[in-house]
Structures are given as C-alpha cells and as structure tokens.
Amino acid sequence: MYFNRKSETMARTELDRLKLRRLKAVAKRCYKVPFYRNAMKASGVRPEDIKNLEDIKKLPFTTKDDLRESAPFGMLAVKLDECIELHASSGTTGVPVTVCYTRNDIEVWSEVMARCLVMAGLTKKDIFQNPIPYGTFTGAFGFHYGAQKVGALVIPSGMGQSERQIQLMKYYGTTFISGVVSYAAHLGQVALNMGINPATDLKVRHGIFGSEMFTPGLKKKLAELWNMDVYDIYGLTEMCGPGVSTDCHLHDGLHLWEDHFLVECVDPKTGEEVEKEEYGEIVLTTLTKEGMPILRFRTHDLAFLYDVKRCGCGRTHIKHSQIKGRTDDMIIISGTNVFPGQIEHVLMQNDRVGLNYRIVIGKKGDMDKLAVEVESREKLGEQEKQELERKLQNELKLVLLLTPDVKILDPGAIPKDTIKAKRVIDNR
Ligand code: DLL
C-alpha cells in the first residue's frame, strides 16, 4: 500500500533529476538568508555552481548552534507573515531551535507523514490515537496532519493522563497508536496495572514510534507487549518534525523521502562522506522547504545508508539503518567510552527485562560509578532479582569493559514525566 505511488516508486533516474532541480532551487533560496549568503561568500560558492548532486559538497554545513544564534526568525527565507505555524525543538540538549512553516511547508509535512503512516499500515478505516503532546514539539501535529490526510479517524488524546489514554483506546476501539517510544512502553505498563492486557483486551494492532533511540530488542518487546506491528519513524524539528523516514513492512531499514530531503552520511570528525553501508553521521538538506530551508544539517545521528536499490516493497527511496545513537551521547566513565545504545542492546535481549531503564552515573571517592537501573517484565522475588542482576552485570561487563552496578526495579517503577525518556542521569 502506498499513499503516493507515483512519488514513492519513482525511477531512480527521474528521482535524481528531481533532486538536482530542487537542490539548485534551495541553494538559491538559501542565498537570501544572511547566514548562508555569508557562508557561501566566504567559501567562494554561488548557487549557480551547483551543477550536479555531488556539488552539494560545495555548500556549507549547518549546525544546531548556527540555528540557535539566528533564533528565533533569523534563518527565515520568506517574510514572517508568509508563515502560518511555528514549532520548536524539545531543547533537551540546550536552547530550543525555532522553525516556521509556510502553508506549503505544512502541506509537504502532511504528505510525507501520510506516506510514512500508510507505509506502516494506516488506512482510512483506522481509529488513530495520538498520545503525544500537542504543543510546540513537532510530534503531535505531524502525526495528526498525516493521519487526517490518509482519512483515518484521529483521536488527539495528547500526552499524559495515561489511564485515560487506555480507557479511550477501549471505549473508541483504537486500532493504531503513535508517538514517542518510551511513552508507548509506559502506556503498555499502565494498561497491565489496570488489569487490561494490551495484547488481548485492546484492538491496537499497529504502532508507529520514534523520537528516541529504538534498538531492535526494544522494538520487539513493544510488539509483544501490545501484539502489534511496530514501525520506527525518524524525524527532527529542523527538517519538519517526524516524517523524514519510516520502515516498510519488511522492517529492514527506513525509507527516507528523497524528493523532499537530501541525505548524506559523513564521518562525524572530518565531515567527509563515508563508504556506502558504513556508519556515519546523517546530514540532511531540505529540498522543498520555503519558510526555513536548511542546507546540510549536522544531525549528530549515527546510522548507515543502504546501497540504493528497489526495495521488496517497491519503493525506490534510499533506506538508512535504525539510528544507532548520537555522536554526542557518549559518556566517559573513568576513561572508558560508554554508549547508551550498547546498554539498551544488552538489556533488551533478555526476556525477563521490561521496557524501561535508566543509566545513573555518580562518584565513589574519586572513581566514577556506573549504575544501570532496569524494570523487570514481571514482579520478581528477591532471589530472582539478584540472579538477574548478576547475569546482566556480566553481560554488560563484556560489552562495556567495565563493571556496572545493576539494579532490578519492579515494573513501572521508573517515572515517566518528560516527553522523551531521561535515560542518562549524570550526578557527577
Ligand atoms: O523527536 C521528532 C519526532 C517526533 C520524530 C515523534 C519521531 C516521532 P526533535 O525533538 O527535534 O524531533 O528530536 C530529533 O530525536 O535528531 C534523533 O536524535 C532523535 N530521533 C527522532 N526519531 C528517532 C528514531 C523529534 N526513530 C532527534 N530513532 C533526532 C532514534 C530518533 N532517534
């Protein structure tokens, strides 16, 4: 099932021609923005120098700090009164970035979201519940616009009041849910606490989640908890919000809508392109955005690009792997580099582990101390807890090359009070 068969299955040659035409146009549009004009002048590049897709390398990178320095409206390529909506990044890693959308930007966002949702199985017959905060965070509106474009019945339930979310699912017969990965996990636990088994007592059979690290193990646990087909959706405020890419029913990589976003994968240190199928930092350029076009945005997200070929689902748009982590999420513990993704990967392989965990870093004397707190799937006795703690400690030790304390918590013990889960608590 496609939302837009023509665009989603477009021949590569045609797609590349379209990308080049749009890249030339966006370079011209950006030249109107002082930040880009200065950067291009400094490196002696003019928009007319873009003759082929490789020439994107001549254009300047954009970082989050660049956007912050021009915030809130300094990066606009149109007059403010041509914009009809504003969103801002969640600001988990600093001052929020503001983005403005023209009417056409909202139309494009709805289109790419509709493609993602249909790829994840949404039809106009679905009852689509959107348990994600409606506000300046892009999440809710992206899903909302996309699902309405498909023609599903949207329940804008927002985030929070978790028991009510479950009651709404039961009352309206919700079939499809969306949102942030950790909140879907939390809602499953809330349902169980209410004596409702999401796998058998609710009608939810599809879910599409993102906004946070989503290892295959966590995806599998979420699928089992809810008895649903789970899809991974990627996106970021700077591009539009959710809707940049999603996995198809084959669940092998996420298709990225190349007619609207141009993707590169670079070595985070040098900025040079990495080999195909090699991990690097995802760099994105908006190809059709009017309000706030962005060139070569350094996402900090680590993934690899698949070699381009038609996927078994028929789509021609390039795929990237799941996001493995961020270049800036590395923690240094007593001189050893630790990535949260490594920890999530180990925890989620274990059947007795639940869906929620956090990493707490403190000091013992002069030494850094790493502790991993993780919920069990079912409530365990003291002895079972200790056995599981020892097992996970040994498994983590092998991967991290240091010995963390592991503490098993009861299901639901870790509070869920922020939009994105706070996985790392650094008390040093
Ligand atoms: O989180 C947009 C979004 C909302 C995507 C809902 C999907 C679902 P930001 O707050 O700007 O936007 O955060 C963007 O979140 O650079 C990644 O580090 C991370 N991220 C987003 N989707 C995924 C995903 C929204 N599927 C930042 N897997 C990005 C892993 C993700 N990380």
Image: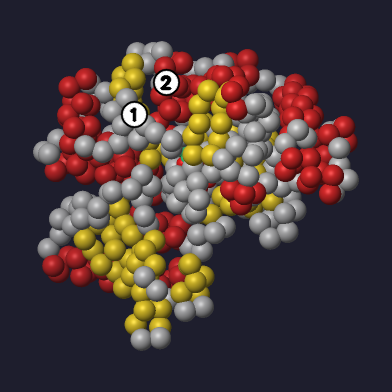
Residue 140: give x, y in percent of width and height.
40, 31
Residue 83: give x, y in percent of width and height.
57, 24
259 with respect to 368 (left or right) = right
Mark 2 lies on a secondary structure that is helix
Q: How many marks?
A: 2
Residue 165: give x, y in percent of width and height.
22, 32
Labels 2 & 1 near each other (Cβ < 8 A): yes
Amino acid at the residue labelled 1: Asn
4 with respect to 385 (left or right) = right
The label shown at residue 5 is: none
Residue 365: give x, y in percent of width and height.
36, 86
For disc 2, the marked residue is: 147
Residue 93 at least partly seen: yes
In the rendered image of this protein, does residue 146 appear above or below residue 333?
A: above
The label shown at residue 130 is: 1
Tell me what residue is drawn at x 43 percent, y 76 percent: 402
Amino acid at the residue labelled 2: Ala
In the rendered image of this protein, does residue 293 appear above or below residue 298?
A: above
354 with respect to 24 (left or right) = left
Q: CA distance from mark 2 to mark 1?
A: 9 Å
Tell me what residue is drawn at x 63 percent, y 19 percent: 7
Mark 1 lies on a secondary structure that is loop
Point out the image quarter for the C terminus: bottom left
In the rendered image of this protein, does residue 179 appear above or below residue 117?
A: below
Disc 1 packing (10 Å; few <14; some 14–19; many ≥20): many
